[in-house]
Image (cartoon, grey):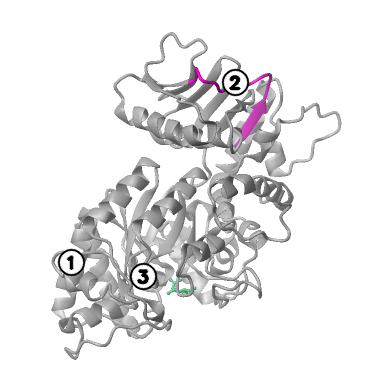
Amino acid sequence: MRVLRRTLGTLLVLGLLGGCLSCAAARGDDAGPGDRRAEAPAPYEQLLPAPASVRAAGPGYPLGPGTVIRTGPVGDDEVRRVGELLAEQLRGPTGLPLPVVEGLEGTAGAGILLRIDARAEGVGEEGYRLESAPRGVTLTARTPAGLFHAGQTLRQLLPPAGAGTVPGGQITDAPRFAYRGAMLDIARHFFPVEQVKRYVDQLARYKVNTLHLHLTDDQGWRIAVDSWPRLAEYGGGSEVGGGPGGHWTKDQYRDLVAYAAARYVDVVPEIDMPGHVNAALASYAELNCDGKAPERYTGIKVGFSSLCVGKDRTYEFIDDVLGELAALTPGRYLHIGGDEAHSTPAADYAAFMDRAQAVVGKYGKTVVAWHQLAAARPAPGAVLQYWGHDKTAAAEKAAVAAAAKAGHPLILSPADRLYLDMKYDATTKPGLAWAGYVPVRRAYDWDPGTYLAGSGVPASAVLGVEAPLWTETIATRPDLEFMAFPRILGLAELGWNPAPPDWSGYSRRLAAQAPRLDAESITYYRAPDVPWP
Ligand code: TNX
């Protein structure tokens, strides 16, 4: 696949006038002797994630008061919505009216065209082609998702403020991985929907297409469940450190899911079980083996709570909860946790996970679970999320590799690479360090395709990557953003661009994002080894 993509890139390069510029730059290829590649205009070199292939050529398209956004085919409401959203995103920085009109006819000098072409080549399901010349910019994709991603690239080709010119050239682009995710823990500390929307905006901007929400844990239950109302009403009323906590109503949750969907971000909800359940046990005495509800919990220990595996009521509970959650979830995945069940004996754990996975299947969804499920009996098709690190025991990795070879896709979230709650270094105020420090370079500088190859995981088993942000020590928006940015951009790059890591090229492109992050008032860590402006 990767070789294919590279070959495709090379063919494009050979076939086109100016030569492939940023693909070579992004891949760290050395220009051989006699190489006649021209200098790419800066904006193409700054794109993050780097596109699969870029050719810069000739003069570009200057946006102006007459610029319109045209969408086609006529009557395709989804393409129209992508156009409307792009217009909205461009109006702020450009100050232009950018009306959206349907129909691609009579388009000479027409501005920005969004067109679906089911046979577009080299773009897959989520990729796109972008062509910029003096008469306009054309975005072509097989799907509305591809057009959305093209629009995000277009935004990066324009200055952070002002109308500007889209430099002349052509991009053909497609992602390396289908799953490019970020996880947010709203259980340890509660975060309101509006703040999560802001995060979704940023993720979508960098082509991250999945938001995994850790909705429940010992310290709080954050999503309303009609059949068990005390979960949210009582179990939601706590968080780490003794704050008031909170929960989302179903309407708020639906609103977030729709907001994310409009940006081609799929929401994967997680109900963690059979451990990490103190908030549920505190809310309903009947869920406890001894029939007694514990106090709510506001500390940061893990591994002390467990659902009562031998009780029928436990399975009525998970059926009700997962059924209601499935009904709120247009996407295919339900995450059922399964990590750190230290208070559940191994045989009980396996028996419980068998039944929990069956419930997910009954509601028509695909299981995602933390990789501890590998040591039990993952159901056919279940996806495992690996959160090990360099010191993870070989036997644990071997269990994951066996599952991968048996056909279970893997999402890679190595804790010492992608855990956004790990401190950058000893001076970082928020965060933990149990997996070590994770500087910006370390988060980026590895290859998901070969990461577990030494343990026997085939590259084809890797569905993608995800960066989790656990919030035991993170309670405010500035802290959340400071931990996520800029490491989440490294995740975006790893998930999209097929090139081997190239820190010097990447860190320059990362630095070029600074004015864009500043324009959004994002608090980010100015890592000392990034050449920030
Ligand atoms: C491990 S990762 C956990 C979480 C903690 C996190 C803190 C995982 C599946 N479990 O419960 O919040 O470490 O870094």
Secondary structure predominantly adopted by residues drawn in magenta: loop
Ligand 1, by image quadrant, is: bottom left
* Label 2–label 3 contact, CB within 8 A: no
Magenta extent: 52-67
Which mark, by number, is residue 61?
Answer: 2
Disc with the residue nearer the chain's start (2 vs 3): 2
> Label 2 crowding class (10 Å Cα cut-off): few <14, some 14-19, many 20+?
many
437 lies above or below 281 = above
Residue with the mark numbered 3: 187
Mark 1: which amino acid? Answer: Asp
Residue at 29% across, 82% down = 306
Relative image position of residue 300 (x, y in whole percent): 43, 81
- In screen coordinates, is 302 left or right of 359? right
Q: Amino acid at mark 3?
A: Ala
Residue drawn at x 71%, y 37% is 24
Query: Residue at (82%, 35%) from the top-left corner?
Result: 32
Q: Which mark is residue 319?
A: 1
Describe the element under mark 3 as helix, strand or loop. Answer: loop
Viewer can see residue 405:
no
The N terminus lies in quadrant: top right
**Residue 183 on the magenta segment:** no
